[in-house]
Amino acid sequence: MRSIAKHSLDLDLTDKDWFRYASFQGKSSLQADSVTRLQSLPALAVLSGWAEVFFALLVMAIALSSLYLVEHYPRGIAFLICLGSFLTVFIIKRLVTIKKYGFGSKKVMTISQNHIEIEELAKKVKKGGSELVNKNDISEVVFNYTYIRKNKHRVGGVANKTRAVLHTCDIHLNDGKTISLDAMRVGLFNVLYLLVFHQYPLKFRNTSAGGIGTMSIILLRLFALGAIGNALILLGNKLF
């Protein structure tokens, strides 16, 4: 049984199990005095939980409607109705997301050996504006993580592949304040890479606590996209 107690890890920046997906401008030329700006992750921008559920249900309803449409309309028309309806929902959701977060990537954090600047967009609780936190004012930065293990069949046997998954990042200050990062807007592996490089006080907990909501939204999106994808494939199977 795994322990969720806080502990330290001796991480190597070349460890692909941890830093396979760490990617940011200036990574290859990092130095002790580097000041690195991290950009947001526009593709993972999340609306409120209810809004995400609403749009996912709309997409699944469109997928289910294909069963009715194919019985009452020519297959080509049914395909166009489903595709047009899905694109309409997709565009509306995209416009709502842009209205909330703005267009494209934006600066979310700046990390150096002496301080971290955290933009409001990077916070899980989006209020209070940007904050500049000195390294000396940080008691610890806590990451919640789990491991994913996969077996890959190769010539001569089975190879076990392990990959770390980061769920949350909480910055604890000496005055008792905690700043939690939004994992759907900030690349946590990029943050961890820089904090390890600049030797910030890090702690880890082997648990997915705090990341269930994020994973649920991603799974909901994948389920909805899978449903509409299957519906369009079935409708278009005899058209193309």
Image: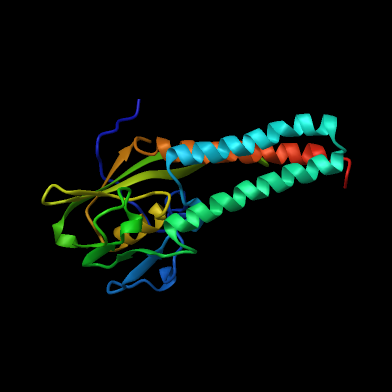
Q: Is residue 146 left or right of residue 202?
A: right
Residue drawn 45% across the image and 46% down it:
47
Do we see residue 149 in this rendering? Answer: no
Q: Looking at this view, is 46 or 67 the one in front?
A: 67
Q: Which sits in the foreground, 109 or 220?
A: 220
Relative to 203, residue 13 above or below: below
Q: Which picture quadrant has residue 76?
A: top right
* Front residue of this view, candidates 72 and 177: 72
- Residue 156: percent from left, percent from top: 65, 39
> Horizontal placement of 203 versus 158: left or right?
left
In this rendering, would 238 be left or right of 151? right
| Of the pair 29 and 23, the residue shown nearer to us | 23
| Residue 214 to residue 19: above or below | above
Name the residue: 40% across, 74% down. Answer: 29
Residue 112 seen in render: yes
State the image coordinates of residue 9 (x, y, percent, origin top left): 30, 46
Question: Seen from this angle, which residue lies furthest top?
Answer: 1
Q: Residue at x 39, y 39 (%)?
A: 211
Residue 152 rendering spot, x and y as whole percentages: 61, 39
Image quarter in which the N terminus is found: top left
